[in-house]
Amino acid sequence: MNIVTKDMTIGELLSLNQSIAPILQRSGMHCIGCPSSQNETLEEAAAVHGLDADILTAQLNDFLKDMM
């Protein structure tokens, strides 16, 4: 079961699990704490940082699955 989708906002992701923050930061998203990034979707943020949103979504879902 996938929890994270690429149309979720950064704010939604961080509300889901704060441990997602370091994963996003390691992938190059250092501005996740900025107010404007909170309403940006994972797909939009990935595009700005030259990342593949599908791969990032899969990584986040794997991380959350391992936590269960």
Image: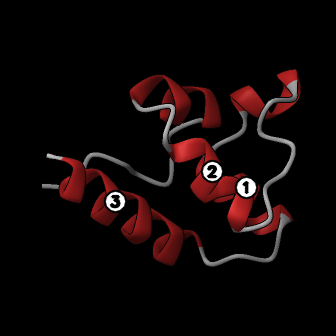
Q: Which residue type does callout 3 highlight?
A: Phe
Query: Where is residue 1, by image quadrant?
Result: bottom left
Q: Which residue is mark 2?
A: 22
Query: Where is residue 29, by image quadrant?
Result: bottom right
Say the numbered circle drawn on residue 36.
none
Q: Is residue 15 left or right of residue 50?
A: left
Answer whether residue 2 is visible to the viewer in this image: no
Q: Of the two numbered discs 1 and 3 on the same chain, state the one appearing first in sequence.
A: 1
Q: CA distance from mark 1 to mark 2?
A: 5 Å
Residue 35, horizontal then vertical, whole percent: 85, 21
- Callout 1 secondary element: helix
**Dots 1 and 2: beta carbons under 8 Å?**
yes
**Dots 3 and 2: beta carbons under 8 Å?**
no
**Dots 1 and 3: beta carbons under 8 Å?**
no
Q: CA distance from mark 3 to mark 2?
A: 12 Å
- Callout 2 secondary element: helix
Q: Is residue 25 left or right of residue 52?
A: right
Q: CA distance from mark 1 to mark 3?
A: 14 Å
Rendered position, 48 above or below 36: below
Q: Which residue is mark 3?
A: 63
Q: Which residue type does callout 2 highlight?
A: Pro
